[in-house]
Amino acid sequence: MHIFVKNITSTLLDFIFPPQCFLCKRSGSVICMTCLAALQPLSIPRCQHCHTILTTKGTCRQCWEHPLRLSGLRTFSAYRGPLRTCIHALKYEGRKQLAEPLGCLLAEAYTSYNLRTDIVLPVPLHTTRLQERGYNQSALLAAVCARQLGIVYRDDLIIRQRPTRPQVGLSLQERSRNVTGAFQSTCIFTTGAFAKRRILIIDDVCTTGSTIEACANALFAAGAHSIWGLVLARPDTG
């Protein structure tokens, strides 16, 4: 009953005070159709495994030298322009309503890449960071994506057991060391808990994939069959 009343209230408020497009300020939706069309994937060559932007088709140097254990990593688009503005607002400005349209873009990307998974989960925040921010933007995105796809959503399967430095500005090796051992499966059994399960880990932005890889290692240790990463954006370089 509480959820029903909340939904009715939200609908009435939207009718009286229609939402404005975050980008162009037109009334009608959180992100209007015109601006949403500007947040489309870029048709540029990417690594077949980690999705790093390439100058030619194939596998990137990083995957030749230090391949991710992940089954694969996919990105929606590049971290620039209007998409970067939206992600920054969701993550740092409390614009949680942006999670709905951005999560739907992730669901569209999932379908376009023909991914097949059983469980969707977000990259977790450490409790200290979660208390500071008040929410986990990746969890908001993952919940919307899972709902759109009709896939089970869980946010209680892994935890960030220690705080980590921001990855911005760190080298590939520093990023890897920063998150190594930072995540742990919450399952009672250390092995076999995810036998034959296909898992999708969602985050807002990634650069090298080190954070999602660290999450995946905890899940592989619990017996996951395959683990894919899916993120909204990745910088043009790095």
Image (cartoon, rainbow, N blue to C red):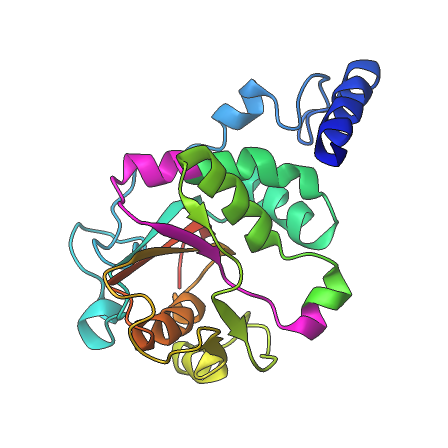
Q: Is residue 37 above or below residue 144?
A: above
Picture quadrant of residue 200? bottom left
Q: Quadrant of residue 198?
A: bottom left
- Drawn side of residue 139 relative to residue 8, left or right: left
Query: In x, y percent, where is residue 100?
Result: 59, 35
Q: Could you say which is closer to the camera, residue 135 or residue 61?
A: 135
At horizontal 34% and vertical 57% (from top left) the residue drawn is 199
Residue at position x 30%, y 72% from top?
Answer: 220
Position of residue 38 measured from the top left corner of the image (x, y, whole percent): 50, 28
Along the line of sight, the residue nearer the viewer: 190 or 177: 190
In depth, the one of 152 and 160 nearer the eye is 152
- Residue 213: image quadrant is bottom left
Q: Which residues are magenta?
A: 107-129
Q: Is residue 142 above or below residue 197?
A: above
Name the quadrant of the C terminus: bottom left
Residue located 62% across and 43% down the image? 85
With respect to residue 107, does 11 lie above or below? above
